[in-house]
Amino acid sequence: MRETEGLKVIRITRIVKFVRVLRLVRLLKLRRLSVKIYEQVSSRVMTLIISLVKLFFMIFMIAHWSGCLFFLIGDAQGEGEDPDVPVSWVEADGIREASIGVQYVASLYWALTTLTTVGYGDITPVSIDERLYTMVIELLAAALFGMVVSNMASLLAVFNQQQTLKNEQLVEATAFLKKKGVPRELMLRVR
């Protein structure tokens, strides 16, 4: 009887792993779809908007996984012997028995405040494992911040390049019209 129960547990575990693999395949399809949409967009403004949305989505995904792992580390610490001395941030905040929604929001909140280097200090790591993980996330946040600034600068440079070209063409057209002696009122209308 116990062998059949053990086999059922193994089968269920395999099914769960298979479902997770299917989810990864769906993410790959989403990537292909985003590439197709990106190829279809011809407007520079639309390209800028799509790039910003992709950037924010990436930041949110990093925050999501960082927060989930932070909660997992805190929850794995277990409960301490003395209820007045918490052994993890999960215990310190009193969310071990809270709903999964409350736990997720607290974890995501920690991740976003850490990644954005705001760090209010209301959710703090307690154990050594949590502190080490927080240091890794802080280093990741520094690299992420540099990447975001770099991406924003290059996006704005491309957008600004188009405006600069337009301004140069306008200056050349104005110089040409002045050279040909076109009246000022007509030059203003041409602009």
Image: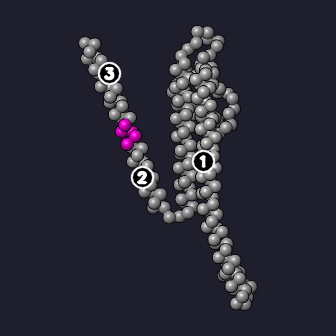
Q: Which residues are magenta?
A: 21-25
Residue indicated by mark 2: 33
Q: Is residue 161 above or below residue 92?
A: below
Q: What residue did someone put label 3 on? A: 9
Q: Which residue is mark 1?
A: 147
- Could you tell me which quadrant the C terminus lies in? bottom right
The front one of 176 and 128 is: 128
> Helix, strand, or loop for circle 2?
helix
State the image coordinates of residue 58 (x, y, percent, origin top left).
53, 44
**Quarter that holds the N terminus:** top left
The scheme the figure's colours follow is one colour
Label pair 3/1, CB-CB below 8 angstroms:
no
The residue depicted at 58 percent of the width and 23 percent of the height is 129
Amino acid type of the residue that numbered disc 2 sits on in the rendered structure: Leu
Q: How many angstroms separate mark 3 from mark 1 (CA)?
A: 44 Å
Prevailing secondary structure of the magenta residues:
helix
State the separation of the CA atoms marked 1 and 2: 24 Å
Q: Is residue 31 left or right of residue 156?
A: left
Q: Position of residue 182 (x, y in %)?
A: 71, 89
Furthest residue in direction top, as rendered: 81
Q: Is residue 22 magenta?
A: yes
Any part of residue 87 in sight: yes
In the rendered structure, find residue 20 and report the number of the disc placed on it. none
The answer, for residue 93, to whether it is visible in the render is no
Looking at the image, which residue is at 52% across and 35% down?
A: 65
Question: In the rendered view, does 120 fall on the left or right side of 47?
Answer: right
Answer with mark 3 or mark 1, whichever residue precedes in sequence: 3
Name the kind of residue labelled 3 in the image: Val
